[in-house]
Image: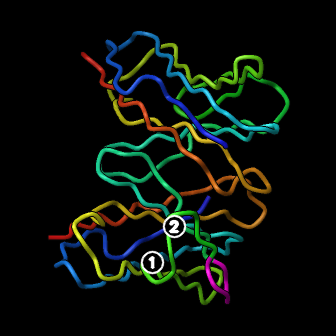
Amino acid sequence: SAVISQKPSRDICQRGTSLTIQCQVDSQVTMMFWYRQQPGQSLTLIATANQGSEATYESGFVIDKFPISRPNLTFSTLTVSNMSPEDSSIYLCSVVVAGGNEQFFGPGTRLTVL
Amino acid sequence: AQSVTQPDIHITVSEGASLELRCNYSYGATPYLFWYVQSPGQGLQLLLKYFSGDTLVQGIKGFEAEFKRSQSSFNLRKPSVHWSDAAEYFCAVGAGSGGYNKLIFGAGTRLAVHP
């Protein structure tokens, strides 16, 4: 397994601003992902965070809106840019540990955009 | 396209009763299937997974699931529900290479437990 922390745990932001969410893992992982969970909805994969290169985005998500960095094996950030109320969601990072075959999820960041 | 259907949005059971949560998937190849639980204010916790082999898999917290290829189903079961099992349950299929990335989630089933 892995211990995953996310910062901040929650935030309330004004429209038009940006928020960067951090994901830190206590062990080396092979893969990191970012998901969005809109209110009352299921999880949708935003992108795969690739170490040292551009993230791989899923259909409907673009780098300008959700820039992602992954400078090393244990850390990644997701920025939600130019926010609108529709971006109010829980954002979760997940990881696959080295030698593993399942995703472990962080506690999530609850974002509210006013 | 790959998809996961959880037909039941809400389920209410009495404590001590048995439980079955339904999950149907659509996937062209052999699916990698997962059940996660999300308790209020918590992240997702993996209950169990199926990759291959025995179609009845055991998980944590007394849960089990049975893979039925002919029915494209992966239903979650528990013989006796505890009040602490009240949570949201998500079925997912691994749609990417390796089977454990690019998870596609179902809409979830919210479980309420009556004392």
Q: Is residue A40 depicted above or below B76 in this figure?
A: below
Determine whether, in the image, residue B86 is placed left or right of residue B103. Answer: left
Chain ID of residue with mark 1: A
Determine whether, in the image, residue B47 is placed left or right of residue B28. Answer: left
Q: Is residue B92 depicted above or below B59 in this figure?
A: below
Position of the C terminus of chain B by quadrant:
top left
A94 or A34: nearer the viewer? A34
Position of residue A82 measured from the top left corner of the image (x, y, whole percent): 30, 82
Verify CB contact (< 8 Å) between mark 1 and mark 2: yes
Position of residue B93 measured from the top left corner of the image (x, y, whole percent): 65, 42
- The magenta-colored residue range is A50-55
Position of the N terminus of chain B by quadrant:
top right
Determine whether, in the image, residue A23 is placed left or right of residue A20. Answer: right
Residue A53 falls inside the magenta stretch: yes
SS for callout 2: strand
Residue A96 placement: quadrant: bottom right
Q: Which residue is mark 1?
A: A66
Furthest-right residue in view?
A: B53
Residue A28 falls inside the magenta stretch: no
Q: Residues within 10 Å of mark 1 (few under 14, many from 20)?
A: many
- Kindly identify the amino acid type of the residue bearing the numbered disc 2: Trp
Residue B107 placement: quadrant: top left
